[in-house]
Amino acid sequence: MSAVLGDFVDVLLDLQGEEKMSDSDMVAVLWEMIFRGTDTVA
């Protein structure tokens, strides 16, 4: 069996209805992930 799994961005894009995020909210979440990741290794 091969299951198609998406990454975190796929999950954000697949949200529907009340759970749906605006484009600017998705960009903010992704930037936070990048900056928080670099902050932990600095």
Image (spheres, rainbow, N blue to C red):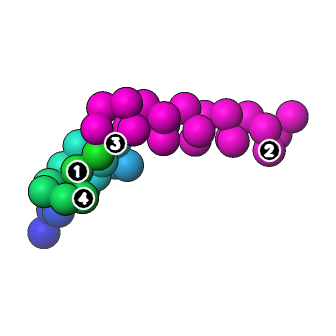
Is residue 24 rendered to the left or right of residue 22?
right
In contact (CB < 8 Å): disc 3 and disc 2: no
Question: Nearer the N terminus, badge 2 or badge 1?
Answer: 1
Mostly what secondary structure, the magenta segment? helix
- Stretch of the chain drawn in magenta: 22-42
User: Which numbered disc, 4 or 2, marks the residue that appears first in the sequence?
Assistant: 4
Residue at which label 3 appears: 9
Residue 19 tag number: 4
* Residue nearer the viewer, 40 or 27: 27
Label annotation for residue 20: 1
Q: Between disc 3 and disc 2, whose residue precedes?
A: 3
The amino acid type, in three-letter code, at marker 4 is: Glu
- How far across and down, in percent of the image, does residue 22 sit? 28, 38
Graded by Cα atoms within 10 Å as few (under 14), some (14 to 19) or many (20 or more), the crowding at tag 4 reads few
Spatial CA distance of label 1 from label 3 is 13 Å
Q: Which residue is mark 2?
A: 40
Seen in the picture, residue 21 relative to 18 is either above or below; the reply is above
Residue farthest to the right, as pictured: 42
